[in-house]
Amino acid sequence: MSRRMRPPAAPTLRIPRQRRGQPVIVVLSSELEPTLTARAAAASGRWVWKHRRTWAPTGLAVVLLAVTGLVHLIEPRTAWAVSPLALTPVGVWAWTARRRPATSRTARTWRALLTATATAGVGWVPVAIWFGPTVPAVALSWALLTLTAQIAWLIARRLTTTAEEIR
């Protein structure tokens, strides 16, 4: 008397008899619940997608890190062609200051800080292409610039949101 045992997780399913003896096909998933890793990945993905605008500077910095690493591996001399772009923020600042002068000392200070940070960020690209983004000093400057950009982005978003709510 051998009895076939059903696995403990298999559900019991009763299907009424079909007309003309047609077979019934039932598809059961072998995995009943997603694993903890799959749940964590899905939750992280939903959170990142929900807050994608908040983390835009960090995402851009990660893309730049990967691109500069790739360009460094392919052709490091590209840094010489890209390096003049490091002065672009200073030129934009000078042009803006001439066309629309700041009305307050605070506005002048914020513009100067923004220009300095943007110049450092754009200047990082040729340095990373030439030396490689994994050199400790270059990686540290990337991390500090990314942190600075992210904090400035969050402050600017909060100030913009507050200013829009006041109107």
Image (tube, rainbow, N blue to C red):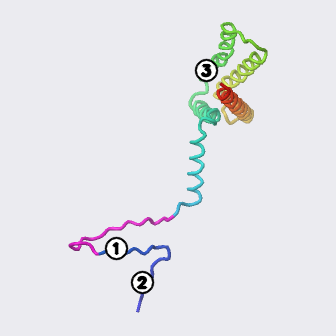
- Whether 135 is drawn above or below 35: the answer is above
Quadrant location, the C terminus: top right
Chief secondary structure of the magenta portion: loop
Which residues are drawn in magenta? 17-32
3 vs 1, front mark:
1
Amino acid type of the residue that numbered disc 1 sits on in the rendered structure: Ile
Q: What residue is shown at x 63% (from left), y 34% (from top)?
A: 65
User: In the orientation shown, which residue stands out farthest toward the left?
Assistant: 20
Under mark 3, the amino acid is Val
Instruction: From this view, report whether residue 136 is shown above or below residue 46.
Output: above
Q: Residues within 10 Å of mark 3 (few under 14, many from 20)?
A: some
Residue 29 lies within the magenta run: yes
Residue 38 percent location from the top left of the image: 56, 56
Give neighbour class at mark 1: few <14, some 14-19, many 20+ (Cα, 10 Å).
Answer: few
Residue bearing mark 1: 15
Q: Quadrant of residue 63?
A: top right
**Cα distance in 3D space between marks 3 and 2:** 72 Å
* 10 sits to left or right of 159: left
**Residue, x 58% and y 28% (percent of image)?**
75
Dots 3 and 1: beta carbons under 8 Å? no
Report the mark closest to the observer, 3 or 2: 2
Write down the residue under mark 2.
4
Residue 135 % position (x, y): 71, 35
The residue indicated by pointer 3 is 82
- Label placed on residue 29: none
